């Protein structure tokens, strides 16, 4: 009879260890596990710089510039930041083009306006699609390569880029 009790006692510390691990992961009552910024849900457990990279159009360099401008600790969890800091970060993300150097924006000298812009989210997809469509309509070299689904930037195509081929070599019947 002593053996079953010992097994139960041996299992109890293992459960306590698991519980301790989970309690270390919880951050508190004011911790936000999902932070909404620039029409994107960001995991609150990520560091600030890495969390900002979840926004489409924000990469490593842009995230570092934004965090430095906001004077926020880059290694702080983004869910632990207060709402005022998150609002300030969002404002800086949306107004990035105003304080960033022209080489650090993702749309320099826009085709229609001639201004520098930094696009985020769906706007980035839409305008890139419009640019590709404009090249195809003009029948430029890049437009022709896009329309035929070939490499655009001068890469070799002999052995790579074979996605989408219909048939391989057929056997003799």
Image (cartoon, rainbow, N blue to C red):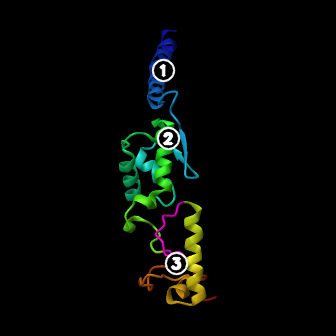
Q: Is mark 2 on a helix, strand or loop?
A: loop
To which residue does mark 2 refer?
A: 44
> Depth check: 87 or 34 in front?
87
Q: What stretch is highlighted in magenta?
A: 110-120
Q: Mark 3 points at which residue?
A: 111
Frontmost of labels 3 and 2 is 3
Say whether residue 116 is magenta. yes
Residue at the image point whose x is 48% and y is 9% from the top: 2
Q: Which of marks 2 and 1 is nearer the N terminus?
A: 1
* Nearer-the-camera pick, 33 or 10: 33
Give the numbered dot on residue 11.
1
Q: How far apart, in angstroms, are the residues tagged by discs 2 and 1?
A: 33 Å
Contact (CB < 8 A) between labels 3 and 2? no
- Mark 1 and mark 3 lie on one chain; the one further toward the N terminus is 1
Label 3, residues with CA under 10 Å away: few <14, some 14-19, many ≥20: few
Name the spot of residue 7 as percent of width and height, x first: 48, 17
């Amino acid at each position: 009879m002593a053996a079953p009790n010992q097994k139960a006692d041996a299992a109890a510390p293992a459960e306590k260890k698991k519980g301790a691990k989970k309690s270390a992961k919880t951050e508190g009552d004011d911790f936000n596990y999902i932070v909404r910024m620039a029409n994107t849900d960001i995991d609150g457990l990520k560091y600030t710089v890495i969390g900002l990279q979840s926004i489409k159009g924000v990469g490593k360099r842009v995230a570092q510039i934004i965090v430095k401008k906001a004077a926020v600790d880059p290694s702080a969890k983004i869910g632990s930041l207060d709402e005022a800091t998150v609002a300030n970060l969002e404002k800086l993300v949306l107004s990035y083009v105003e304080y960033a150097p022209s080489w650090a924006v993702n749309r320099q000298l826009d085709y229609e306006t001639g201004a520098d812009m930094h696009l985020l989210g769906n706007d980035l997809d839409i305008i890139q699609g419009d640019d590709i469509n404009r090249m195809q309509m003009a029948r430029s070299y890049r437009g022709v390569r896009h329309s035929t689904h070939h490499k655009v930037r001068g890469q070799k195509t002999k052995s790579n880029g074979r996605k989408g081929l219909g048939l391989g070599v057929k056997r003799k019947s």
